[in-house]
Image: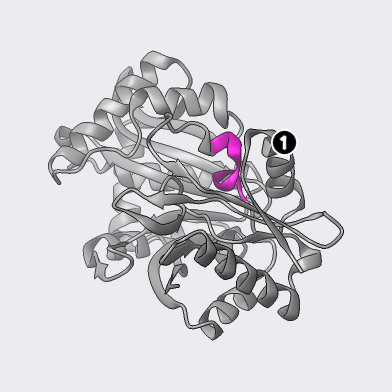
Protein backbone atom coordinates (compact mmCIF):
# COMPACT_ATOMS: atom_id res chain seq x y z
CA UNK A 1 0.00 0.00 0.00
CA UNK A 2 1.41 3.36 -1.05
CA UNK A 3 0.35 6.86 -0.04
CA UNK A 4 0.66 9.64 -2.61
CA UNK A 5 0.94 13.31 -1.74
CA UNK A 6 1.04 16.42 -3.90
CA UNK A 7 4.36 18.22 -3.72
CA UNK A 8 4.59 21.20 -1.36
CA UNK A 9 7.48 23.52 -0.56
CA UNK A 10 8.00 21.79 2.80
CA UNK A 11 9.13 18.66 0.95
CA UNK A 12 11.84 20.41 -1.09
CA UNK A 13 14.86 19.17 0.90
CA UNK A 14 13.42 15.64 1.23
CA UNK A 15 12.74 15.56 -2.53
CA UNK A 16 16.19 16.72 -3.61
CA UNK A 17 18.03 14.44 -1.19
CA UNK A 18 16.05 11.49 -2.54
CA UNK A 19 16.55 12.37 -6.22
CA UNK A 20 20.24 13.28 -6.02
CA UNK A 21 21.54 10.91 -3.34
CA UNK A 22 19.22 7.92 -2.96
CA UNK A 23 17.55 7.23 -6.29
CA UNK A 24 18.77 4.91 -9.04
CA UNK A 25 17.48 7.07 -11.90
CA UNK A 26 17.26 10.61 -10.58
CA UNK A 27 19.32 13.48 -11.98
CA UNK A 28 19.56 17.19 -11.24
CA UNK A 29 16.99 17.68 -14.03
CA UNK A 30 14.35 16.17 -11.72
CA UNK A 31 15.44 18.12 -8.64
CA UNK A 32 13.40 20.96 -7.22
CA UNK A 33 16.53 23.09 -7.33
CA UNK A 34 16.50 22.83 -11.11
CA UNK A 35 12.74 22.99 -11.63
CA UNK A 36 12.55 26.12 -9.48
CA UNK A 37 14.35 28.13 -12.15
CA UNK A 38 11.12 28.29 -14.13
CA UNK A 39 9.30 31.55 -13.42
CA UNK A 40 6.12 31.27 -11.40
CA UNK A 41 3.14 30.66 -13.64
CA UNK A 42 5.01 29.03 -16.53
CA UNK A 43 3.80 25.58 -15.43
CA UNK A 44 1.08 24.41 -13.08
CA UNK A 45 3.00 21.99 -10.89
CA UNK A 46 1.39 18.69 -9.92
CA UNK A 47 4.48 16.77 -8.82
CA UNK A 48 3.91 13.79 -6.54
CA UNK A 49 5.67 12.03 -3.67
CA UNK A 50 4.97 8.32 -3.13
CA UNK A 51 5.43 6.98 0.42
CA UNK A 52 5.49 3.34 1.53
CA UNK A 53 3.69 1.81 4.54
CA UNK A 54 6.52 2.84 6.86
CA UNK A 55 6.11 6.44 5.70
CA UNK A 56 9.45 6.34 3.88
CA UNK A 57 9.77 7.97 0.48
CA UNK A 58 9.71 5.30 -2.24
CA UNK A 59 9.44 7.41 -5.39
CA UNK A 60 8.79 10.88 -6.73
CA UNK A 61 7.20 12.02 -9.98
CA UNK A 62 8.07 15.56 -11.14
CA UNK A 63 5.13 16.76 -13.21
CA UNK A 64 2.94 19.59 -14.40
CA UNK A 65 -0.36 19.95 -16.14
CA UNK A 66 0.04 20.11 -19.91
CA UNK A 67 -0.38 23.83 -20.75
CA UNK A 68 -2.58 22.80 -23.69
CA UNK A 69 -4.65 20.25 -21.79
CA UNK A 70 -5.17 20.63 -18.03
CA UNK A 71 -6.45 17.05 -17.82
CA UNK A 72 -3.09 15.70 -19.03
CA UNK A 73 -0.49 14.84 -16.37
CA UNK A 74 2.90 15.54 -18.00
CA UNK A 75 6.18 14.46 -16.42
CA UNK A 76 7.70 16.94 -17.18
CA UNK A 77 7.22 19.83 -19.66
CA UNK A 78 9.91 21.89 -17.94
CA UNK A 79 12.68 19.30 -18.01
CA UNK A 80 14.29 16.90 -20.45
CA UNK A 81 13.32 13.99 -18.20
CA UNK A 82 10.71 13.34 -15.54
CA UNK A 83 9.10 9.95 -15.00
CA UNK A 84 8.97 7.80 -11.89
CA UNK A 85 12.17 8.32 -9.89
CA UNK A 86 12.84 5.40 -7.53
CA UNK A 87 15.35 4.06 -5.05
CA UNK A 88 16.97 0.63 -5.20
CA UNK A 89 14.81 -0.85 -2.42
CA UNK A 90 11.60 -0.32 -4.38
CA UNK A 91 12.98 -1.30 -7.79
CA UNK A 92 11.59 -4.82 -8.15
CA UNK A 93 8.71 -6.23 -10.16
CA UNK A 94 5.97 -6.53 -7.54
CA UNK A 95 6.71 -3.22 -5.82
CA UNK A 96 7.13 -1.17 -8.97
CA UNK A 97 3.96 -2.58 -10.49
CA UNK A 98 2.06 -1.56 -7.35
CA UNK A 99 3.58 1.93 -7.53
CA UNK A 100 2.49 2.34 -11.16
CA UNK A 101 -1.04 1.14 -10.38
CA UNK A 102 -1.26 3.41 -7.31
CA UNK A 103 -0.13 6.36 -9.43
CA UNK A 104 -2.78 5.65 -12.07
CA UNK A 105 -5.51 5.33 -9.42
CA UNK A 106 -4.46 8.63 -7.85
CA UNK A 107 -4.49 10.44 -11.20
CA UNK A 108 -7.92 9.10 -12.13
CA UNK A 109 -9.29 10.28 -8.77
CA UNK A 110 -7.69 13.68 -9.44
CA UNK A 111 -9.64 13.86 -12.74
CA UNK A 112 -6.68 13.43 -15.08
CA UNK A 113 -7.59 11.73 -18.34
CA UNK A 114 -4.11 11.02 -19.73
CA UNK A 115 -0.44 10.98 -18.73
CA UNK A 116 3.04 11.27 -20.23
CA UNK A 117 6.18 9.95 -18.52
CA UNK A 118 9.55 11.00 -20.00
CA UNK A 119 11.76 8.55 -18.13
CA UNK A 120 15.48 8.85 -17.42
CA UNK A 121 17.42 7.06 -20.20
CA UNK A 122 19.78 4.18 -19.54
CA UNK A 123 22.96 6.25 -20.02
CA UNK A 124 21.94 8.49 -17.09
CA UNK A 125 20.57 5.76 -14.81
CA UNK A 126 22.59 3.91 -12.17
CA UNK A 127 20.37 0.86 -12.74
CA UNK A 128 19.00 -0.25 -16.09
CA UNK A 129 15.50 1.16 -16.71
CA UNK A 130 14.45 -2.08 -18.44
CA UNK A 131 12.13 -3.18 -15.63
CA UNK A 132 10.34 0.19 -15.56
CA UNK A 133 10.07 0.18 -19.36
CA UNK A 134 8.66 -3.34 -19.45
CA UNK A 135 6.09 -2.73 -16.71
CA UNK A 136 4.84 0.41 -18.47
CA UNK A 137 4.52 -1.65 -21.65
CA UNK A 138 2.73 -4.36 -19.62
CA UNK A 139 0.29 -1.72 -18.34
CA UNK A 140 -0.57 -0.79 -21.96
CA UNK A 141 1.39 2.45 -22.26
CA UNK A 142 2.23 3.66 -25.73
CA UNK A 143 5.97 4.16 -26.21
CA UNK A 144 7.68 6.92 -28.17
CA UNK A 145 11.42 6.83 -28.83
CA UNK A 146 13.92 9.62 -29.52
CA UNK A 147 17.29 8.59 -30.95
CA UNK A 148 20.28 9.90 -28.99
CA UNK A 149 23.96 9.59 -29.94
CA UNK A 150 26.87 9.56 -27.52
CA UNK A 151 30.53 8.76 -27.18
CA UNK A 152 31.42 5.77 -24.99
CA UNK A 153 34.96 6.62 -23.90
CA UNK A 154 35.49 3.15 -22.41
CA UNK A 155 35.20 1.74 -25.94
CA UNK A 156 36.97 4.63 -27.67
CA UNK A 157 40.48 4.51 -29.10
CA UNK A 158 42.94 6.49 -26.97
CA UNK A 159 43.91 8.54 -30.03
CA UNK A 160 40.73 10.62 -30.23
CA UNK A 161 41.05 11.68 -33.86
CA UNK A 162 41.41 8.07 -34.99
CA UNK A 163 37.73 7.57 -34.03
CA UNK A 164 36.59 10.40 -36.36
CA UNK A 165 35.97 10.01 -40.07
CA UNK A 166 38.47 11.49 -42.51
CA UNK A 167 36.55 14.73 -43.11
CA UNK A 168 36.26 15.47 -39.38
CA UNK A 169 39.96 14.75 -38.81
CA UNK A 170 40.77 17.21 -41.59
CA UNK A 171 38.46 19.83 -40.04
CA UNK A 172 40.10 19.50 -36.62
CA UNK A 173 43.61 19.75 -38.05
CA UNK A 174 42.63 22.88 -40.01
CA UNK A 175 41.21 24.46 -36.86
CA UNK A 176 44.41 23.72 -34.97
CA UNK A 177 46.49 25.24 -37.80
CA UNK A 178 44.34 28.39 -37.62
CA UNK A 179 45.09 28.59 -33.88
CA UNK A 180 41.50 27.95 -32.81
CA UNK A 181 41.17 27.58 -29.04
CA UNK A 182 38.39 26.39 -26.74
CA UNK A 183 37.81 27.80 -23.26
CA UNK A 184 35.24 27.91 -20.53
CA UNK A 185 33.50 31.25 -19.99
CA UNK A 186 32.36 32.64 -16.65
CA UNK A 187 31.19 36.24 -16.76
CA UNK A 188 27.58 37.26 -17.30
CA UNK A 189 28.65 39.41 -20.24
CA UNK A 190 30.39 36.50 -21.98
CA UNK A 191 27.34 34.30 -21.43
CA UNK A 192 25.17 36.99 -23.06
CA UNK A 193 27.54 37.06 -26.08
CA UNK A 194 27.41 33.26 -26.26
CA UNK A 195 23.60 33.33 -26.12
CA UNK A 196 23.55 35.80 -29.01
CA UNK A 197 25.53 33.31 -31.13
CA UNK A 198 23.01 30.59 -30.20
CA UNK A 199 20.02 32.84 -30.89
CA UNK A 200 21.35 34.00 -34.27
CA UNK A 201 22.12 30.42 -35.30
CA UNK A 202 18.64 29.14 -34.41
CA UNK A 203 16.96 32.07 -36.13
CA UNK A 204 17.62 30.53 -39.56
CA UNK A 205 15.49 27.55 -38.48
CA UNK A 206 12.75 29.87 -37.13
CA UNK A 207 13.45 28.52 -33.64
CA UNK A 208 14.20 30.31 -30.37
CA UNK A 209 16.48 28.96 -27.62
CA UNK A 210 14.64 27.14 -24.83
CA UNK A 211 16.55 29.27 -22.30
CA UNK A 212 16.99 33.02 -22.24
CA UNK A 213 20.43 34.46 -21.47
CA UNK A 214 19.11 35.50 -18.06
CA UNK A 215 17.95 31.93 -17.33
CA UNK A 216 21.32 30.46 -18.30
CA UNK A 217 23.05 32.94 -15.99
CA UNK A 218 20.71 32.03 -13.13
CA UNK A 219 21.22 28.30 -13.74
CA UNK A 220 24.97 28.80 -13.41
CA UNK A 221 24.99 31.30 -10.56
CA UNK A 222 22.06 30.09 -8.45
CA UNK A 223 20.30 26.85 -9.33
CA UNK A 224 22.76 24.24 -10.66
CA UNK A 225 26.26 25.78 -10.51
CA UNK A 226 27.97 22.37 -10.36
CA UNK A 227 26.00 20.86 -13.24
CA UNK A 228 26.38 23.40 -16.02
CA UNK A 229 29.22 25.12 -17.88
CA UNK A 230 29.60 27.20 -21.04
CA UNK A 231 32.36 26.88 -23.62
CA UNK A 232 33.33 28.90 -26.68
CA UNK A 233 35.87 28.45 -29.43
CA UNK A 234 37.78 31.56 -30.40
CA UNK A 235 40.60 33.05 -32.39
CA UNK A 236 42.19 35.68 -30.16
CA UNK A 237 39.17 37.43 -28.55
CA UNK A 238 36.67 36.65 -31.31
CA UNK A 239 34.12 33.97 -30.33
CA UNK A 240 33.10 31.81 -33.30
CA UNK A 241 31.24 28.84 -31.76
CA UNK A 242 29.49 28.01 -28.50
CA UNK A 243 28.17 25.09 -26.52
CA UNK A 244 26.33 24.51 -23.22
CA UNK A 245 27.42 21.48 -21.19
CA UNK A 246 25.53 19.65 -18.44
CA UNK A 247 27.26 17.27 -16.02
CA UNK A 248 25.72 14.06 -14.65
CA UNK A 249 28.22 12.90 -12.00
CA UNK A 250 26.44 9.69 -10.90
CA UNK A 251 26.98 8.15 -14.35
CA UNK A 252 29.99 10.31 -15.28
CA UNK A 253 28.24 11.65 -18.36
CA UNK A 254 28.54 15.00 -20.12
CA UNK A 255 25.54 16.15 -22.14
CA UNK A 256 25.87 18.91 -24.74
CA UNK A 257 23.27 21.40 -25.92
CA UNK A 258 23.06 24.40 -28.25
CA UNK A 259 26.24 23.59 -30.22
CA UNK A 260 26.43 26.24 -32.95
CA UNK A 261 28.79 28.60 -34.74
CA UNK A 262 28.83 31.95 -36.47
CA UNK A 263 27.89 31.72 -40.15
CA UNK A 264 31.03 33.54 -41.34
CA UNK A 265 33.25 30.82 -39.80
CA UNK A 266 31.40 27.85 -41.34
CA UNK A 267 34.24 26.97 -43.76
CA UNK A 268 36.62 26.58 -40.82
CA UNK A 269 34.12 24.24 -39.08
CA UNK A 270 34.59 25.36 -35.47
CA UNK A 271 31.67 23.11 -34.49
CA UNK A 272 33.82 20.07 -35.30
CA UNK A 273 36.49 21.55 -33.08
CA UNK A 274 33.95 21.93 -30.26
CA UNK A 275 32.94 18.25 -30.54
CA UNK A 276 36.62 17.36 -30.26
CA UNK A 277 37.15 19.75 -27.35
CA UNK A 278 34.22 18.32 -25.35
CA UNK A 279 35.68 14.82 -25.67
CA UNK A 280 38.98 16.18 -24.36
CA UNK A 281 37.10 17.85 -21.49
CA UNK A 282 35.36 14.58 -20.58
CA UNK A 283 38.63 12.66 -20.57
CA UNK A 284 40.26 15.34 -18.42
CA UNK A 285 37.43 14.95 -15.87
CA UNK A 286 37.63 11.14 -16.00
CA UNK A 287 34.05 10.99 -17.30
CA UNK A 288 32.86 7.97 -19.29
CA UNK A 289 30.33 9.32 -21.80
CA UNK A 290 29.68 12.41 -23.92
CA UNK A 291 26.06 12.72 -25.07
CA UNK A 292 25.36 14.77 -28.20
CA UNK A 293 21.59 14.79 -27.73
CA UNK A 294 18.79 13.57 -29.97
CA UNK A 295 18.53 13.77 -33.74
CA UNK A 296 14.75 13.45 -33.71
CA UNK A 297 11.69 15.62 -33.24
CA UNK A 298 8.01 15.18 -32.41
CA UNK A 299 8.58 12.30 -29.95
CA UNK A 300 10.83 10.50 -32.44
CA UNK A 301 8.44 10.64 -35.38
CA UNK A 302 10.80 12.91 -37.36
CA UNK A 303 14.44 11.92 -37.95
CA UNK A 304 16.99 14.56 -38.95
CA UNK A 305 19.25 12.32 -41.02
CA UNK A 306 21.84 15.03 -41.70
CA UNK A 307 22.21 15.77 -37.99
CA UNK A 308 22.47 12.07 -37.18
CA UNK A 309 25.13 11.52 -39.85
CA UNK A 310 27.17 14.41 -38.47
CA UNK A 311 27.08 13.02 -34.93
CA UNK A 312 27.96 9.53 -36.16
CA UNK A 313 31.11 10.89 -37.82
CA UNK A 314 32.79 11.31 -34.41
CA UNK A 315 32.60 7.60 -33.62
CA UNK A 316 29.32 7.79 -31.75
CA UNK A 317 27.07 5.01 -30.57
CA UNK A 318 23.33 5.06 -29.84
CA UNK A 319 20.80 5.16 -27.03
CA UNK A 320 17.07 5.79 -26.94
CA UNK A 321 15.14 8.32 -24.83
CA UNK A 322 11.70 6.90 -24.13
CA UNK A 323 8.41 8.65 -23.44
CA UNK A 324 5.36 6.65 -22.32
CA UNK A 325 1.75 7.74 -22.84
CA UNK A 326 -1.52 6.36 -21.53
CA UNK A 327 -5.16 7.38 -21.49
CA UNK A 328 -6.57 6.90 -18.02
- 286 part of magenta stretch: no
Q: Is residue 219 visible?
A: yes
Horizontal side, residue 191 vs residue 128: left or right = left
- Specify the quadrant of the image occupied by residue 57: bottom right
Please name whichever residue, 11 or 199, is drawn nearer the observer in this view of the structure: 11
Question: How many residues crowd mark 1 within 10 Å: few (<14), some (14–19), many (20+)?
Answer: few
List x then y, in percent, for residue 250.
Answer: 68, 51
Q: At 38% across and 22% down in the image, what residue appears?
A: 214
The image shows residue 1, relative to residue 248, as above or below, that is below
- Give x and y (percent) for residue 9: 63, 33
- Which residue lies under the disc numbered 1? 13
Q: State which quarter of the image contains the C terminus.
A: bottom left
Residue 87 located left or right of residue 100: right
Main SS of residues in magenta: helix
Residue span colored magenta: 27-34
| Residue 95 location, quadrant | bottom right
Residue located 56% across and 29% down the image: 223
Extreme residue toward the right, this view = 54
**Nearer the observer, 172 or 187:** 187
Percent x, y for residue 130?
A: 61, 76
Quadrant for residue 185, please give it: top left
Query: Can residue 316 be seen from the camera position used here?
Result: no
Amino acid sequence: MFRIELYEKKYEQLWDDFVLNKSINGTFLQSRNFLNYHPEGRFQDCSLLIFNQKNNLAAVVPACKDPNDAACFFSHKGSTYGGIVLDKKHYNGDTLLEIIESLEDYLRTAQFRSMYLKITPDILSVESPSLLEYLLYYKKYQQYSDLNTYIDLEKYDEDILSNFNQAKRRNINNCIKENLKCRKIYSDNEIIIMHTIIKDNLKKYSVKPVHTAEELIKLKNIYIPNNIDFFVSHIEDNFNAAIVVFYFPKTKTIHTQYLCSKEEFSKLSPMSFMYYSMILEAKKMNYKKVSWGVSTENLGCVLNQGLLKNKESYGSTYSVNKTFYKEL
